[in-house]
Image (cartoon, rainbow, N blue to C red):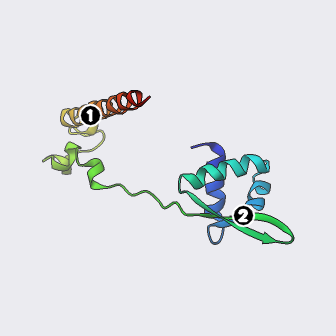
């Protein structure tokens, strides 16, 4: 995510109702209106913010509302990790004889997940190059 987008999110998070006028946003960030407008348009496409036309004080702007919710980890995202079925989990810890730093089971789980991810990326790349 771009630095400007992160600043916009922080500004919206710190506002009372997670919304601000677009004109106030670019002024408060000491940025130009075009940069902020483009960043907000990208963020709206990603579903991070919602912009609604706002007319007040004889000028047109948008009310920008933060709609992105914190992502939650799904069990399906981490079920591959061997730690969840390890009998030594209660005795495992950094600096201990049983540790993630030197765990063969965890290393193999990570390696297998990495290989699976690589293959998935290769398939996506092959599929997208076949469409062109």
| Rendered position, 102 above or below 1 | above
Residue 48 shows in this picture = yes
- For this rendering, which residue is in front, 120 or 100? 120
Instruction: Assign the N terminus to one quadrant of the image.
Output: top right
For residue 7, say whether it is visible.
no
Name the residue tied to disc 2. 62
Near mark 2 (Cα within 10 A), the count class, few <14, some 14-19 or many ≥20, is some
* Side of 101 where 14 appears, left or right: right
Q: Position of residue 91 (x, y in %)?
A: 19, 48
Residue at horizontal 66%, vertical 46%?
4
Q: Secondary structure at mark 1?
A: helix
Q: Which of labels 1 and 2 is toward the front? A: 2
Residue in front for this viewpoint, 61 or 87: 61
- The x, y position of residue 118, in whole percent, is 32, 30
- Image mark count: 2
Instruction: Determine which quarter of the picture holds residue 127.
Output: top left
Looking at marks 1 and 2 on the same chain, the residue that comes earlier in the sequence is marked by: 2
Instruction: Report the side of 63 relative to 27 (left or right).
Output: left
Q: Residue furthest right?
A: 58
Helix, strand or loop under label 2: strand
- Position of 104 relative to 67 (above/below): above
The answer for how far apart the CA atoms under marks 1 and 2 are is 44 Å
Residue tagged 1: 116
> Crowdedness of circle 1 by 10 Å Cα count: few (<14), some, many (20+)?
few
Provide residue 101's location: percent of width, then percent of height.
Answer: 29, 34
Residue 59 left/right relative to 111 = right
Q: Position of residue 43 (x, y in %)?
A: 59, 52
């Amino acid at each position: 995510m771009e630095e400007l987008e992160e600043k916009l999110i922080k500004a919206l998070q710190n506002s009372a109702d997670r919304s601000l006028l677009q004109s106030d946003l670019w002024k408060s960030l000491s940025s130009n209106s075009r940069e902020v407008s483009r960043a907000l348009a990208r963020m709206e496409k990603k579903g991070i913010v919602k912009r609604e036309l706002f007319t007040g004080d004889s000028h047109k702007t948008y009310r920008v509302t933060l709609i992105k919710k914190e992502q939650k980890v799904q069990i399906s995202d981490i079920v591959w990790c061997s730690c969840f079925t390890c009998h030594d989990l209660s005795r495992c810890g950094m600096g201990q004889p049983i540790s993630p730093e030197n765990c063969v089971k965890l290393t193999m789980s990570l390696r297998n997940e990495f290989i699976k991810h690589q293959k998935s990326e290769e398939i996506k790349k092959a599929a997208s190059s076949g469409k062109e």
